[in-house]
Structures are given as structure tokens and as C-alpha cells.
Amino acid sequence: MVIVRIGYMPAAAPPDRDGFTALVQGLEREGFDSLWVSERPTGPAGDPVVALTYAAALTSRIKLGTAVMALPGRPPALVAQELASLDLLSGGRLLPAFGLGVRNPGDQQAFGVRREERAAMLDEALPLLRRFWAGDEVTHHGAHYDYDGLRITPRPAKGGFDVWLGGASEAELRRTGRISDGWLASFTTPAEGERGRLLIQAAAAEAGREIEEEHFGAVVPYRRGPLSPELEKRITGAARRVHGPAAPDDVAPPLEALEAHLKRLVEAGLSKFVLIPLGPPEDWDTELAAVRDAVLHLQKG
């Protein structure tokens, strides 16, 4: 039986205490699996770790994920401590997913990295995070990071994390197979989701590894109401930047078609979903109840 999990991520907007509180508490009440937050230093949504820390204090059950957190430009030792601390305070509910960061000059300035440096930095940083979380005394002299007998505390609640990566290029997919524990796609069609999964599994096999079948997921946008020309341009443009041309309904279906879309993604081998509305709703209680009725019965396992 396929284990389907359905989480939720708010659309990028300036932090709003009352709205975010309603969202977080609504997800816990309605039975969603998880809350996810995105990251853009030059965007409006704020810091992901701060947001998840606030959410952890409001909840006791839902898992807490980053979709995705940029790793290049952050010191691995401090990231290890920061995320382990949040995991412990939340009762072991953190789901870290990392990426290279958005291809945006402003974001790269904020992290202090050049675009061409990012991939090598991630390749070097992720194994270091695993060593720190395992409680190792780390000695490492690399191109970007240098440690001599450094041990970081505390450790995560379970002594480590299953770390997922985002990304859609062939290089990013192969890296996911080589060094990560799962894949979180974005703006993907079912066909592209299946292609990415197969490429990742092949790269993992080449590296003598195996990624669990349940560790493939996607951020899934959905919309309410008719598709305006502006919204269609936004959807197709985002899909083109990630995978290539795609029909809007294959990337961001209307709510009434979301169940069928998720089923197609499950058939493609994906089973962990992060739903994101293409616009902030007027009322979170009403919105989450509607999404619950539309698709939450698919969550099982």
C-alpha cells in the first residue's frame, strides 16, 4: 500500500501573526500531515526557521518542513545546531529539505555566494551535516569548509534526519540520488515527476545506494476560480523555468481537479505532497476545510 501524506504551505506573503496562527492551528485540527515553509531572502515570507519555531510552539502533532532551505552560504556547523535545536524543541517533528537556492542575484548576494559555487558547496556541506548530527568529532579540510576536531551539540531527537533535496535539472536529480534521502519536486507535471524519480533512482543505484520508494514528493500548487491570463502566464512561466512547457492544469489544477491530479502523481511514483494555494485565502478555516473535503481522504498508510 502506498503511504500518501498531504502537507500544506502558505503562499509567499509578508508574515502575518494572526493569519499564520490560524493556518498552523487549522492544519493540526483538520488532520493534515505537515506544515512547510519556503525561503527567499529577497522575498516577502520571512525566515523559515523562525516561522517553524513559532509553529512548533502552537502545535503538538504536525511535522514541520522546509521547502526548500538554501544550504550554500550557511555554515554547516551552525545549521546543524540550529536545526537539531528546533527538532528537539518540537519533539522530533522537523523535516529538512535543502536546495541550492533560487537563481536570483539578490538571493545569492544575501547568502554571499556566487551562482557557480553553489553546487560544490552543497555537495561538501550535506555530508558534514550528517556527521555533526551523528555526534562525530569532525575534522575536515575542504574547498569551502574547514574544521579541526569540531563536535556540535545538541543532536536531533532521533540522532539524525532523512534529508531531502529539491531541484529539477539533471545535475540536481543526480545529486539527489547520490547524497540525499528523498526528493521534493516543484511545479512538476506527473510525467516530469516520474522522469525525475527514475533518474534519481538510477543515480542512487550507480552510487551503491537506495532511496526508499516513499521518499518522493512534490510541492503542488492549486488554484481557486477561473484562470486569468495573468495567472496562466505565472503558472506556465514557473513550470517552463523548472521543467519546460506545460499545460496549467498539469502543474496547478483547480481545487475541484486536485484529487485527480494527486492520483496521477501517485501513479508516477510520488506520494508526499505539499499543497500551496496560488493566492492567500480570505479565511484559513474555510480554505482548509475545503481542501480537507477535496483531498485529505487520500492520506493513508
Image: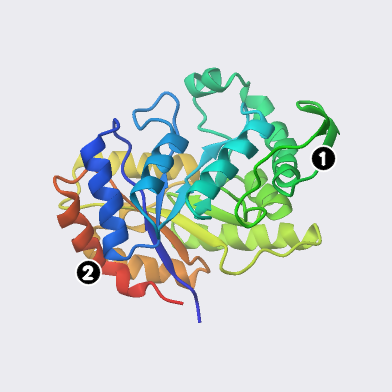
Q: Is residue 114 visible?
A: yes
Figure check: 221 above or below 61: above
Q: Which residue is mark 2?
A: 293
Image spot of residue 240 (x, y percent) = 44, 42
Q: Residue at x 50, y 65 (%)?
A: 270
Q: Which residue is mark 1?
A: 137
Give, as a three-letter code, the residue at label 2.
Asp
Quarter of the rendering containing residue 154? top right
Between the C-alphas of marks 2 and 1, the distance is: 49 Å
Q: Which residue occupies the foreground of this view, 55 or 9?
A: 55
Q: Is residue 284 left or right of residue 296?
A: left
Q: Residues within 10 Å of mark 2 (few under 14, many from 20)?
A: few
**Of the image marks 2 and 1, the number of the one nearer the N terminus:** 1
Q: Residue at left 47%, top 63%?
A: 272
Q: Does 208 sit left or right of 40 as displayed?
A: right
- Residues 238 and 79: in front is 79
Q: Is residue 192 left or right of residue 173?
A: left
Q: Within 10 angstroms of label 1, few (less than 14), some, or many (20 or more) residues?
A: some
Residue in the picture at 23% in, 60% down: 255
Q: Residue at x 33, y 44 (%)?
A: 235
The spot of residue 105 in percent (x, y) is: 51, 20
Q: Is residue 136 left or right of residue 241?
A: right
Residue 239 appears in which quarter of the rendering? top left
Query: Which dot marks residue 182?
Result: none
SS at badge 1:
loop
Quick one: SS at disc 2?
helix
Specify whether residue 167 is in view: no
Numbered disc in front, either 2 or 1 = 1
Q: For residue 216, what is the image quadrant?
A: bottom right
Vertical relation: 209 (above or below) 45: below
